[in-house]
Image (cartoon, rainbow, N blue to C red):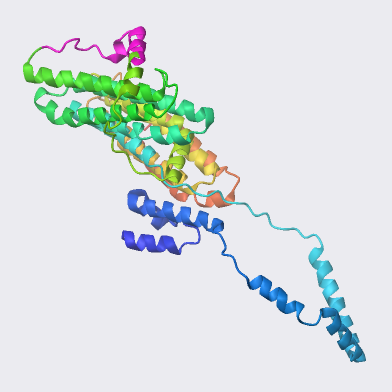
Amino acid sequence: MNCTAIKRRLFALTDPADPPAGILAHLRDCAGCREAQVRLIQMEGQIPHVPVPASSAKAALAAKFRGETTLWDRAQFHLRTVERWHVVTVGMAASLLLFFLAWSLAPHEQPIVKTRQPSSAPDVLLVRLVEHNLSLALVEAPRQQVETLSQLAEDLRGQSDPLLRYGDGLEGKESLKDLADWYGQVVRMSVARARRVPPRERRDVLDPIVKQLGAAHDDAQQRAQQLHNVSADHPLCIIAFAAGNAREQLDVLLKHDMSGVPVPGRGVGLARLPTETVLLRRAALVPVLFAAAQNTARAETPVRTPVQAAEQARKFQHNRKLIQTLVDSCLRMAEQQQPDPVQRAASCTVVAERLAEAVERSAAEQDAVRTQEAALLLKKLLQRGVAFNLTTAGGTIPLGDVREPEMVQIGDHVSRIAQQLEENLLRLPDAETRAKLPKTLQAIQDGRAEVFKSLKGRGAY
């Protein structure tokens, strides 16, 4: 179906937050239709709050009744003209009415009605982070690694504003602090990988990244200006410092390519500086943040409604451990001096374990969208991350090689993850939730089957 048909069907649904599978599949791939779904949910949520216009009909109706005879007057008139059979009929009707009233008030065994938790919209950040993991698990060229790390850094930075505005208490502050630390780690790794990009390719690769880092630095500056009592270790200062430092190092690298002069301090990045030096640089950055011009260009960020931003902050906090695992996995694969498919497969397996926990948790919360989304991400990671790298390793590691046990161990780990997840899902107490699990279970089985296929002939496989 095209987008017009999908939107028309969304408007026809009684609950747009829980679309059928056909629409759900389209929503995962179409940002425009997801936006339409979110707006429709917001509109339905605001309907109870629409004010009712004032009316004089109530006063007019009361005046009309006051001008007529009372009910007692009319009753007295009818009683004076009543016949005996009228009294008998009314008595029988009253007896039947009392009988049915007593029966309806008697206690009966009522069926238990369970309230269904509303399904959430797909988590775009989670999907993108898994794609970055898969990209780093497949590519070997430094150019592609640098570009992927740059995209990862921007995706993380894009969550800073929702967390800053709508983060929930202490957990929100901790999430923002973690995000700033992860952003710094990723941009430092991208600088390290940039030094491995062939000189003839650097200008094309690094120019857009330098501009992106400059925009990130300026954006963090401006938002820090709007706060009070900002210290050097505030997350916005950490982001601004990391982006500015990375931009300077890439500028030096590009100028070196043009002049042929050796890069000063080559190989000494921010991660290798003494802790005191890092703190002094951050402290020196604070007055600069507030002295910066008000018209500094802001980075282009996605336009979000307050409801969308608050929902994104909630999702980030909810998935913080999974996000950390995804970022750590990207960094591990990027820092490998020589691409090692076995280590890449092992790194993807760690992420798969976290995704399996997300599948189980969302199923227990009766969130059908998140359950299916996490299961499909798990399947993709097992197929393109674990199985692909094990197959690649199989081309260079012969049967009986000393590294073969590492490959078999990864397969055993995947087997335990999938088996435990299937058992826990089938033990869920809610029958309605279990009835929606076939697609989820099939995704888990498909991913596991690809891993087993990649290990065929090794160990017990």
Image quarter for residue 92?
bottom right
Judge from the rendering whether residue 414 lies leftward or rightward of residue 190; answer left or right.
right
Who is closer to the viewer here, 186 or 450?
186
Is residue 390 visible to the viewer in this orientation of the structure? no
**In which quadrant is the N terminus drawn?**
bottom left
The residue shown at (47%, 47%) is 120
User: At 26% from the left edge and 33% from the top edge, which residue is drawn?
Assistant: 297
Q: Examine the rendering and report whether any part of residue 21 can be seen.
A: yes
Residue extent of the magenta highlight: 262-283
Q: Is residue 400 left or right of residue 304?
A: left
Q: The C terminus is located in which quarter?
A: top left
Q: Position of residue 20 (x, y in %)?
A: 44, 57
Q: Is residue 269 magenta?
A: yes
**Residue 427 percent location from the top left of the image:** 57, 42
65 within the magenta span:
no
Residue 334 percent coordinates (x, y): 27, 24
Q: Give x and y (percent) for residue 139.
A: 22, 31
x 42%, y 29%: residue: 413
Q: Nearer the viewer, residue 273 or 294?
A: 294
* Residue 243 or residue 390, whichever sits in front: 243
Q: Residue 272's image quarter?
A: top left
Q: Residue at x 27, y 26 (%)?
A: 341
Report the number of discs.
Answer: 0
Nearer-the-camera pick, 459 or 39: 39
**373 left or right of 168?**
left
